[in-house]
Amino acid sequence: MKILVINGPNLNMLGVREPEIYGEMTLDKINEELCEFSKTLGDIELDFYQSNHEGDIVDKIQSAHKLYDGIIINPAAYTHTSVAIADAIRGVEVKTVEVHLSNINSREEYRKQSLSAPSCLGIVAGFKQDSYKMALLGLYNALKND
Ligand code: DQA
């Protein structure tokens, strides 16, 4: 099973960026832990991509068509603004789970709306780096039962 993990703007700054909200782990370490966790589930190949640019993220989502079985995405700030990313997820026909390190529903009003969540199979938020593992577990089980 091939899964693409996409991280949006400013997530390359994890470890430095507001650790009280996002935790102290770097993105590389989060990805490493996710790789370890994937081995406990089954035969999963993970590819990782991070970009600070909306169009590049749209291109990457589109490139998953027929190449990947699933996508895990943290669109970061684009969660709340990007119709383009929401449309790309809806259009690519690859099961997608949205992830957030923080609980976006307990923060500022403008973070409570996710434009991308309705295009996704599910959403996991609020468990810092563990959100990615929970997303992978849910996605893996959903794809296995397809
Ligand atoms: C985030 C939440 C977003 O509101 C924020 O802009 C981020 C990270 C999260 O993982 O908690 O950059 O997606």
Image (spheres, rainbow, N blue to C red):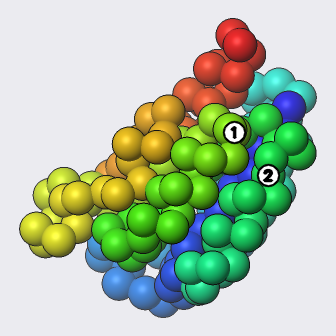
Residue behind mark 2 = 64
Amino acid under label 1? Val
Give 54 or 13, whichever is nearer the viewer.
54
Q: Residues within 10 Å of mark 1 (few under 14, many from 20)?
A: many
Q: Residue 58: name its quadrant.
A: bottom right
Percent across and percent down for residue 89 are 58, 51
- Left or right side of 140 for 103: left
Percent across and percent down for residue 99 are 47, 52
Disc 2 to disc 1: CB gap under 8 Å? yes
Residue behind mark 1 = 94
Q: Secondary structure at mark 2?
A: loop
Percent across and percent down for residue 124 are 41, 43
| Mark 2 C-beta to ligand 1 under 8 Å | no
| Residue drawn at 51 percent across, 67 percent down | 84
Instruction: Residue 74: tell me if it is visible.
Output: no
- Left or right side of 4 for 131: left
